[in-house]
Amino acid sequence: MTKDFTLTVKARDGAARSGAIVTPRGVVRTPAFMPVGTGATVKAMFPEDVDATGADIILANTYHLMLRPGAERIARLGGLHQFMHWDKPILTDSGGFQVMSLAKLRRIDEEGVTFQSHIDGASVALSPERAIEVQCLLGADIQMVLDECTKFPASRDEAATSLDLSLRWAERSKRAFAAAAEPGQALFGIVQGSVYPDLRERSARALSETGFDGYAIGGLAVGEGQAAMLDMVEVTTSFLPQDRPRYLMGVGTPEDLLLSIARGIDMFDCVMPTRSGRHCQAFTWGGRLNLRNARYADDPTPLDPESACPAALYERAYLHHLVKSGETLGAMLLSYANVQFYQELMAGARAAIEAGSFADFSDALRLRYAKASDVPAED
Amino acid sequence: MTKDFTLTVKARDGAARSGAIVTPRGVVRTPAFMPVGTGATVKAMFPEDVDATGADIILANTYHLMLRPGAERIARLGGLHQFMHWDKPILTDSGGFQVMSLAKLRRIDEEGVTFQSHIDGASVALSPERAIEVQCLLGADIQMVLDECTKFPASRDEAATSLDLSLRWAERSKRAFAAAAEPGQALFGIVQGSVYPDLRERSARALSETGFDGYAIGGLAVGEGQAAMLDMVEVTTSFLPQDRPRYLMGVGTPEDLLLSIARGIDMFDCVMPTRSGRHCQAFTWGGRLNLRNARYADDPTPLDPESACPAALYERAYLHHLVKSGETLGAMLLSYANVQFYQELMAGARAAIEAGSFADFSDALRLRYAKASDVPAED
């Protein structure tokens, strides 16, 4: 839609691909993982450390920011990049997913959705046009169409009805975006269709015909299981244009990412590295660790001897002490190390694709995770 | 007591003095403020950022560390410096103050104190000898004698009895330290005597006669009020040797520090900058700010335009948003900025003493604080 937002695919290895999305605010190397900065902060991390992990782009949540501190306020303060001290690209979602999962008393009709703020109970309306307006006020580099996130499980009829509404909203979003966006900003469509391959095809084809700067796959990782998710990824990517980024929303574990890259996904976002970091869990090259585990109380091993992250140099015994004591530094170090692990995983995937050895890279990491991971902590 | 721990007084301005304590782990410029790292972490700060603020030394709490993760464990892991990634000097308290304020079911006799851990209820004994043993296991550069922290208020008789017990414990501490310490480690005595000038004199004279590497003033900032505190500081310092550091324990506000420096104090520790940082309050060159205050919601001013701290560059509107949203980054940024403000305050005091203008420096800062400070937040 704009000439300044382009994807260059540099290498392919099976269906996996590596490349670069060029935007006015910088290059996003793909496959890319976007740390989640819900409320204008990647939780428990300094922005310069998010940058230092190698993240080229982060995600922020339209729903949260429109409620607090407010999109108009952020615009007055110079936009989201300046507000949160992050000058690389930002992708914002449309707010639709959080309206469904967090807001109370929502009502959906053809026009859009009305809901009660989970913060102060205020009544708020969100339409395709308002979602674009908010994202433009924030100054998001990649914006998402408002869609209805189909509930799971959904019957075929429910999924089809929901999908058709989302397609009409996508058209309206595109018109609103064309009228309001800055040069170089991009708009992604979102493929829905629940777990029905023919609906996924219908959604992907219709969106491709309308034409977007990129295509997201929504409505997955909502309880359908990994096998069904991967099936839907595979069928969907086969109907998407080759020259546009594909973004699998809200996914996932390191294993999920590798298996999805193998099916042609270019972009991911997930709260997992930061949320796990606040819950005593670490992703390392050697597997998942639960630092609350008593086995680490006397362990002088660095968190991840294979990582280049400064936070991964801290010894497991110290991290165990910090998390047992409820010290904030534990969450800070584990969030940092986890986000960097995800970035190193993406860098490893890109290099493996370019070397034609992605399957080996993926198999080796998944085997280590299967063998050497702690049971996740309950808390 | 050791030849490697020395104080050089470089300049005097009235009773205020600036200088340097040379230790094997580095030079401590005085007046010095020690950030508090209770549980082997200066709360919500990376050690490298504590370092970057200009802190030459931090304090850690013997009571907390002996209970969790345990002094013997820290020793096995290479000592406290290695454990917490801090290679500059560390001062540890003796544990006595926390036994009085945090532990349950304590019993004090001539031998020492027995108490129940506030973490798991275990019965723990602390004697002057054990307090030194623990501090040596931690590898503390400056160690404190175990004393009885006289309760406040205390009658003259109670204060005298308590003081005499502390003097006997100080002798035992010195003997234990002489047998166990590494070259260059230092032991400080602690002056008690509540708010009774003659008892403060008796304590200071007796400790000076015994001879310590430095002298702390304890039992203040416990409810006696600023005027009484400053009176006790003044009388006490007049009876302490000129060539040894004087350390006012647990103090305090920026105003307290300046008024105490004017009375000859060289060292301070206090949780105020970090605790305030976790409670939405900032110390700046322009005064105290309460970032929860609605007046900051649209304020694009950096937190402290006069500070060199990277965290002080963040805009007040953003910090307001973070603290209102309960985001960890708010506490991280405010803790960092506050600790750096305290260090910049000490640097300013040292420079003013050397320039012979300390009174002007102190008056100007205290006037700004009186005029421009927000009311402290309740939470």
Image: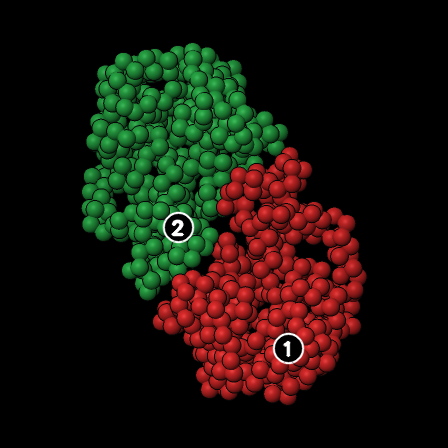
Chain colours: A red, B green
Which residue is identified by label 2?
B334
Q: Chain of mark 2?
A: B
Q: CA distance from mark 1 to mark 2?
A: 49 Å
The one of A345 and B65 positioned closer to us in this rendering: B65
Quadrant of the image containing the N terminus of chain A? bottom right
Q: Is residue A220 visible?
A: no
> In x, y percent, where is residue B306?
31, 54
Instruction: Answer with left or right where residue A183 lies relative to residue A222.
Output: left
Q: Quick check: A133 above or below B323?
A: below
Quadrant of the rendered image containing residue B355: top left
Q: Chain of mark 1?
A: A
At numbered mark 1, what does the secondary structure look like: helix, strand or loop?
A: helix
Q: Amino acid at mark 2?
A: Leu
Instruction: Determine if marks 1 and 2 fall on one subunit.
Output: no
Quadrant of the rendered image containing residue B152: top left
Q: Amino acid at mark 1?
A: Glu
The one of B303 and A10 positioned closer to us in this rendering: B303
Quadrant of the rendered image containing residue B245: top left
Which residue is depicted at the point 63% across and 50% down?
Answer: A282
Which residue is depicted at the point 36% across and 22% down?
Answer: B149
At numbered mark 2, what does the secondary structure look like: helix, strand or loop?
A: helix
Which residue is identified by label 1?
A158
> In x, y percent, where is residue B114?
48, 19
Which residue is depicted at the point 26% across and 51% down?
Answer: B374
Instruction: Assess disc 1: are there few (<14), some (14-19) or many (≥20) residues with their C-alpha within 10 Å of its C-alpha.
Output: some
> In x, y percent, where is residue A40?
46, 63
Instruction: Answer with left or right where residue A233 lies relative to residue B158.
Output: right
Q: Which mark is residue B352?
A: none
Q: Quick check: B324 above or below A245?
A: above
